[in-house]
Structures are given as C-alpha cells and as structure tokens.
Image (cartoon, coloured by chain):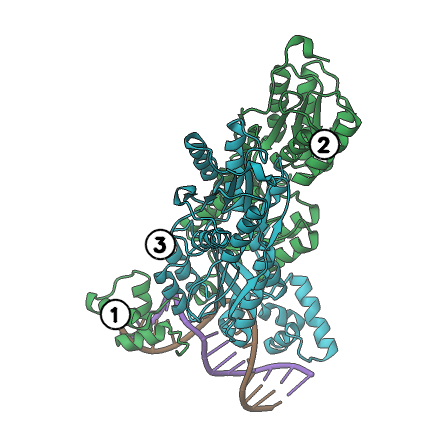
Chain colours: A cyan, B green, C brown, D purple
Amino acid sequence: MEKQRYNLKDVAKLAGVSLGTASKVINNQYVRPEARLKVEEAMQELDYTPNAIARSLKANSTKTIGIMIPDISSPVVGKVLRGIEKISRDSGYSILLYNTTRNTRLEEDAIQAFMRSQVDGIIYLGNTVGDEIAEGLKRTHVPVVFAMTQYPDKYFSSVTIDNEEAAYHAVTYLCGKGHRRICLLAGEADDPNSGIPRTEGYCRALGEQGISVDPTLIVCGGYRLERGYEDMKRLLGERRDFTAVFAVSDDVAIGAMRAVQEAGLGVPEDLSIVGFDGIEMAEYTFPGLTTVSQPFEKIGEEASRLLVSRMKDGKRGGNLVLPFALQERESVLGLAEETLP
Amino acid sequence: MEKQRYNLKDVAKLAGVSLGTASKVINNQYVRPEARLKVEEAMQELDYTPNAIARSLKANSTKTIGIMIPDISSPVVGKVLRGIEKISRDSGYSILLYNTTRNTRLEEDAIQAFMRSQVDGIIYLGNTVGDEIAEGLKRTHVPVVFAMTQYPDKYFSSVTIDNEEAAYHAVTYLCGKGHRRICLLAGEADDPNSGIPRTEGYCRALGEQGISVDPTLIVCGGYRLERGYEDMKRLLGERRDFTAVFAVSDDVAIGAMRAVQEAGLGVPEDLSIVGFDGIEMAEYTFPGLTTVSQPFEKIGEEASRLLVSRMKDGKRGGNLVLPFALQERESVLGLAEETLP
DNA sequence: TTGAAAGCGCTAACAT
DNA sequence: ATGTTAGCGCTTTCAA
C-alpha cells in the first residue's frame, strides 16, 4: 500500500480546473455547477482532505486551543474537560492537551509549546496560578480563561464557584443540625483557590453561630483520598471531641469516612461528614455522602464559551461565578439537644 | 498593548544577517559565533518563538498525535492518558484530544479532524473498535495503536492485559476461598474487549473447578457505578443463593457493595466481592475492595512508546500484553466447609 | 560560512 | 466564473 497524500493541486489537475477554482469549491464559493461536480468527484477519487496546517499558516489562526491541566487523571478535571471539549468541538476548535502535574517548569513548557503551536486561546484548569505563569500567559497575546481558579488581573477571565460561600453554606448546614464542634479537613493552607476561601467560609459560619474557631480542629492536608484517610486516622487516635467533619473534597471525605469506620465508629451516628465537589462516587458510598456539589461540566462549557467569544471578537470576558448546590444524603446526623458536648 | 508576533525574518533583519543564517541558528547548525550571538540577542529582544505551523508545512510532519477517547471523565481513562501524555511529551509530541462518547459518528469526525490536522499518529483508547472505524483509521496512512482494546488486523498495534486470564484468575481465587455460587456482573454482553473475554475467563475457572455455570447468575449491565448498584439491588430482591460476586469493574463492584450494605447485609460476612481495574478508590471503601488491578499508566506509556517508534521507523508494533495483579484486601471471606450451599 | 531563492499547501486579490 | 499569482513562516538546496 502506497502512502499517498494528495493536495488541492492534484485535485484541480484531475478535475481539469485551476487551483483557484478547486479552492473555491472547498470554500463554498460560487463555481459553475459542472465544474464543482468534477472537483468533488476528483476529491472523492483521491480521498482528499484539506491540509489544515497550510490553511492555518495562511489564515494565521489554527482553530486550536491549548489546555493546561494539573492532573488529567483526576475525575474532577475529567468532568470539566468534557464540558470544554464539547463546546470547543462544536465551535470548530481542536484541543491541545498539556498535563502540568502542578509543576511550574512544566507549566512554562506548556506555554512555550502552545506558542509554537500557535494556539488561538488557552484554558488554564484548576491549579493555583503563580505570578510568573500569569506573566507568561499574558505574553502569549492570546485570550486566556481560568477554570476553577482565578487570578487578579483583568487580562484573564475565569469561571468558578464562590468557594467561600459554599463552605459557609455547608458549615451553616452542619450547625443547623446541632453540630458545634466541627473539624475542618482544610486542604492546602496556602491555596488561594480552594483551601483559603473554604477555610474562611468555615470560620465565618462558625462566627455567625457564636462558636469560636478552635484552630486545633483545622487540619491542613491535600485534596486526595489518602490525606483524608491518614489525617482522620491520626486525629481519631488523639481525640474524639468533635461531632462532625467538613472536608474540602469528596475524596478527602471518603478517605476520612473509611478511617472513621475502620475505627469502629459509625457514620453518621458517631460522626457526621460533609464533603465537597459532588463526584459520582459520593452517591455510592455507604452511607451516601452529603456534599457541596460543583457544576463541573458546566464550568468547562462556560470556560469554553468565554474563550470562544474572546477569540472571536476579542471581548474581555470577566469572571463568571456559577452556583453550587448542597446535596443531602445520609452522612449527617441531626443532633438532639442533650447530645451537645 | 500591541499584539505583536515576530517572525524569523524580523529576527534576521534586526540581527543584520540573512534569513538562512537565522534559521541555522535556531536549528543548531554552524554559524560564526558572533553572528549566532547577534541572532540570539535579536530573538531575545523580540521575544521570538518559532512558528511550528510553518515548520510543519515544510517538514510535512506536525509532531502531534491524535487521541480518541470514549469518555475523558472516566478515572481509568485519565490514568492511561497520563501515561500517554508523559511519554509523548518527552518524545517531543503534542497531543490533540478528541472525546468520542462511544459514538460512531463522532469517531468518524475525530478521524477527519486528525487527518486535517495532519497528525503523525493516532492512539485509540478503550472503546470497542467497529469495522468502519478501523477502515477509516487505516485510510489515514498514519500509525495507529490501540490502548486497552484490540482489533484483528496487523496494520494496528495494541497494548492490553489478558482479560480472559485476569477474570479466570479472580474467579479461581474466589473458588479457592471456598465459593461455588459466584455471581458475575458481566458488563456489556457483546463487548469483545472486556465483557466477552472476562465472561469466558469466569466460565473457564468455574469449569475447571467442576462447577457448572448457572446462566441466571450472570447479569449483563455496563461498567458504571449505577449499574452495579441497580443490578445488585434487583438481584438481592430476587434471591440470595450466591456467596460471592465478581464484577467487571471496580465501579460496578462499589455500586454493588452499596446495594449489599443497604440491604442490611455485610461485606464480606454475607457476600464476598471482587472488582476489576484497581482504581484508587478501591483502597478506601469499607471494607477495602479486593480487585484485579490493571497497570493503566503503564498501558498509556507503552502505547505511546509503540506509537513513537512506529512513527520514527515505520516498524510494525505488534500486540503488547501487560501483566495484571490481584490486589487482596478485605472484601472476600474464606468459607468454611459447612457454609457451602 | 553565508546569502538568495525555491517551495511546502493553501487562500485571496487581481486579472481575464 | 475562472485562472494566475503572491505570499503565509520556515527549511534547505545551491551559489558565491
């Protein structure tokens, strides 16, 4: 089998027309019907596909968007990605993927790669944005939108939820159920994206209820299963003077739930747990996990829409804040008066 | 801020050399040191980045690989993707992503898009390959490798595990623990990729133990949490004459576990469960899920390596079969003699 | 060693 | 309505 790749010139020659005419055919400009037919037949015959590279070179636009991701294997990221992919594709854009593993050097590489590839826009997904990276992103001179993260510079747009408010809501809910000693599995202490605002929301809710914040009840770890498990296991070994746990992610909550159950305690009888994210798994743990759910796919879709519109008309996009929702399931117990510590 | 994009000609002019010389500098060919320096300074000054599009047009190679995926939001796919991305990037290839949602029309679109984009190779991830798609893939004339799936045509390479053997292994393990009535949550009945071989492995194991296969103990569903939950819930409503469950995926197993626990039964006291895949979550369910783990990241890496080497030297890759491993955790009970039905 | 120039596949302006 | 041609940014002969 010969490796054959025909071009428009070949098509034109076979059809007996000029290159320009053939070009008009594939671009839906007017050509005499019989000529059009001939060209179409020739295209068919040669199994011709337009070369987008050549077209891009000419048009100075690749119809491609670059996506930087901290960790593709995260289910949360996957959902957002699905939203992005769908809208981008429908708008005629291809997706160039770069996994940065939260590594600044790789982020810089990604930006370089995107510039070389002449992407028309960039979506930066999920990670906290460092200043140098933000600088690098600006120097690309293409529109950039952040999904699930923000950066204080009007050059960028973003799509997020209100993390402070969401955490406030969850903790207020717990207080409403009679809980007063609430442990916070807080994520990364210096993460302006999730860890910090959610901790603030936690503190605000407590304050509003007249409960003073006990810093020893706030433990910073990460966002992964393992941290939830390890941290809760350690905590349970030290003390049991809290009745509820609010975790920064469902993964952490599920890890914590395992530690609780492993310790012979019941959820929610002995300890109530609220998670954050609303991953599908939260529905199938036993008991089902009450959680603050984020509209991941929608976040991706909106990020994509924002980017597409900025690539089209160069408009500033602004910051879009999407609604969250508290999903009540079975992991929270309402406390009777006498149970309070 | 002006949108500026300089090209090599600008660099050459600023450096006071010819275009050809500037080109040699960025391609590390020999130029007089002082000229090289001038060019490098000019590049710096103009913040020059080579235009990969132009380079691709000339070189007739984009250093890009296209990846078709059934569902990006699946954690399993994410892990494979991570392996692919890592190796590809290290080998100098970019990744073009296309999510096909198991839809043949979208798969055809993906192939079209890849051809237009002039990808140098394609990785097809996870889904069962239809004949028309295989045909379309062949007509691209670029190397294609399948990850986690196969197609009987030497044009393609593949990276998989031995699904029949893995299922055989798991079921034999269950038999070794004294189980004789084993329910199979079988996935899709017509899926030559996972469903069929795993069912065959199940049957072979049973046969070898002298246990006759009870077809009413085999229930076909899908691979998702919901199916495991629904199917097991229904089954438990009808009968309880089995002591173990082997599920085609960890998601299904976890869904089933929830149904069992919800029914007031204990895992593994009343019912043993074995999953398939080895996702991280399997470690944090309570009890921990015993499962057959697949080396997802490695599958991605090897697929990528195979593809890269085929793109380089055009060699046929063949089919790579990677080892699986049974992860013993807490979801299986050893049955005493008298417990047998 | 360096410069000039052709050409990768396509589009669009211009001429016919 | 169609053909001719310049040129997108780069690499690579070929001459000098």
Q: Position of residue B213 (x, y in %)?
A: 75, 21
User: Mark 3 — residue?
Assistant: A105
Location of residue A224 with respect to B111 vertically, above or below: above
* Element type at mark 1: helix
As drawn, which residue projects farthest toward the front?
A338
Q: Residue at x 35, y 54 (%)?
A: A105
The type of residue carrying mark 2 is: Met
Can you see residue B26?
A: yes
- Disc sitting over residue B232 in the figure: 2
In whole angstroms, how far apart are the C-alphas of marks 2 and 3?
A: 48 Å
Give the amino acid type for the residue marked by disc 1 in the picture: Glu
Marker disc for residue B41: 1
Callout 1 crowding tier (Cα within 10 Å): few <14, some 14–19, many ≥20: some
The chain holding disc 3 is: A
The image quadrant of residue B321 is top right
Residue B76 picture location, percent across and down: 56, 41
Subunit of label 2: B
- For the residue carrying disc 3, how many other residues have a C-alpha within 10 Å: few (<14), some (14-19), or many (20+)? few
Which residue is located at x 55 percent, y 44 percent?
A274
The relative height of residue B336 versus residue B110 in the rendered view (above or below) is above
SS for callout 2: helix
In this picture, residue B172 sits left or right of residue A128: right
In this view of the protein, which residue sits in the foreground, A117 or B265?
A: B265
Q: Are marks 1 and 2 on the same chain?
A: yes
The amino acid sitting under disc 3 is Arg
* Foreground pick, B150 / B267: B267
Asked if badges 2 and 3 are on one and the same chain, I answer: no
Label 1 chain ID:
B
Q: Where is residue B260, by image quadrant? A: top right
Point out the residue furthest to the top here.
B338
The CA span between labels 1 and 2 is 69 Å
